[in-house]
Image (cartoon, coloured by chain):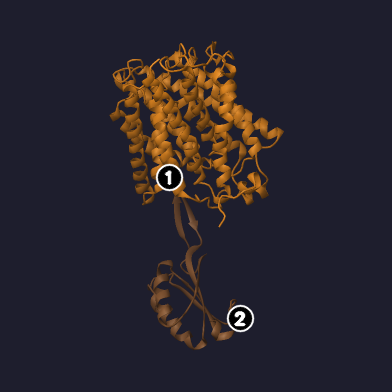
Amino acid sequence: MKKIEAIIKAFKLDDVKEGLSSIGVKGLTVSEVKGFGRQRGHKEIYRGAEYQVAFVPKIKIEVVIDTKLVPEAVRVIREKALTGQIGDGKIFIMPVEEVIRIRTGEKGEDAI
Amino acid sequence: MNSGDTVFIIMSAALVMLMTPGLALFYGGMVRNKNVLATIMQSFIILGVISIEWVLWGYSMSFGPDYGGIIGGLDWMFLKGVGMEPSADYGTTVPHLAFMIFQCMFAVITPALITGAFAERMKFSAFLIFILLWATIVYNPLCHWVWGIGGWMGKMGALDFAGGTVVHISSGVSALAAAIIIGKRKGFGSTAYIPHNVPMTITGAALLWFGWFGFNAGSALAANGLAANAFVVTHVASAAAAITWILMEGVHRGKPTTLGAASGAVAGLVAITPASGFVSPMSAIIIGGLAGMICYGGIMLKSRLGYDDSLDVVGIHGVGGTWGALATGLFASKAINPDGLNGLFFGNPGQLLTQFVSVAVTMLFAFSMTYVILKGIDMVIGLRVSEEDEERGLDITMHNETGYNL
């Protein structure tokens, strides 16, 4: 099992979610996050005073899937989250030791 | 007694009352979320403190029998003799109590305006002492000079229909004194003090605009044509200033902002206040339109001069109030108000000088008294919260609560 964490542009969330559902992903977790990468921040102006805002709002998707599904999931996320502009985000993949469904106690892939 | 006038003044008093909670939202949205309640509280609790001060001694000091043109006597303390019958001098067609409570709302909002200057760093205890002393030592005498029968500024012929000097210049220059004495917020220059809730600020500005109809039209003290004229000039001045402010932004910064539209609207309201009973609607468009531009320049002052007037009280109320008072000396016309005087553009250049004197004296008086009061409080109990409290925010450190629990 692997965990995929993807940082994407907020307005691409629905497309990415639809794409992942269509390849059989049964659940995911979404959070609103802030950060910076090559895109850096942006400026905001209030009453003529300019502020450099270092952190840009993004969406983080976390999904745990069967290892076999990983290449397909990465393809879908890249396809759906792509605008070609700077700031499209990143995908991180990491191993998952165990998954346990709280209600039934099922473990491993059955619990995903 | 006239029942139409009485209804109008009572309703106007209620409208002006709403301006103070409106101001609380206007200011509350502009601070960071850790200070939203403390900022709102500073305006809201003034409704409590100054209302009581007003009926105990403030009204009498302001409007009681004159002593040397300087101050009202204490004959009306605790509202003694202020009853359901009209007063002989003020609002003679409405109950004396109605006039008193209408004026009460002015006394309430004026110190509330100053709170924007020291937002996000003043101790609540020091704040309470400050507003009580400020109302007694600065507002009450000034109010008497301008509006009290026998007050020297009124006798000199200075025109101030609804409070350009009494309310806006006095709060604006007091704000400057306060910003200088209390010092800059922690992290000034390096921290981005981004408004945490601009929609809250817009809501507040809308309530201010609404309540201002009571402030200016109500100052006619009768339900008559002059009140209607004041209503119209108030509205168009605000409208013009909202437009010119965002035009300035468009030229200077590229994009018009909602905070700018709201700030401009308030600047227009401030500027038209002293003139609202003396000028025509077309003059009001000019006064308001220029107010939007002048106050946009006014808010740039603080970064030039290096003081931290957190929410731009100096730039909007000080600068806008000064422009309004001088503009009254330019645009006032006896064709609008036969009881008023003509301004420079209507053949009476001396009026501009009179207005100038009233502005200068108000500035000198309010600035120096505020300076003394705040220095005194600072020496006795200190004005500022500790650096750690400032970092954590005043909501939790002054009031044990937070504005948002998510």
Q: Position of residue A99 (x, y in %)?
A: 59, 81
Q: Secondary structure at mark 2?
A: loop
The residue at 71%/33% (across/down) is B380
Quarter occupied by the C terminus of chain B: bottom right
Which chain letter goes with mark 1? B
The mark found on residue A23 in the picture is: none
Query: Does A7 appear above or below B143?
Result: below
CA separation in Å, label 2 and label 1: 52 Å
**Residue B174, position as x, y percentages in the image:** 55, 31
Q: Is residue B370 left or right of residue B100?
A: right
Q: Is residue B172 above or below residue B334?
A: below
For disc 2, the chain is A
Amino acid at dot 1 = Ile
Left of B104 or right of it: where is B379? Answer: right
Tell me, what hue is chain B?
orange
In percent of the image, x 49 and y 57: which residue is there?
A52
Q: Nearer the viewer, residue A26 or B315?
A: A26
- Quadrant in the rendering for residue B376: top right
Residue B85 x/y as whole percent: 47, 14
Dot label at residue B202:
1
Q: Are the residues under marks 2 and 1 on the same chain?
A: no
Q: Is residue A1 visible?
A: no
Q: Give A46 or B135, whichever is nearer the viewer.
A: B135
The quarter of the picture where the N terminus of chain B appears is top left
Q: Residue at x 43, y 67 (%)?
A: A10
Name the residue beneath numbered marker 2.
Answer: A105
The chain shown in brown is which?
Answer: A
At x 41%, y 40%, the residue is B206
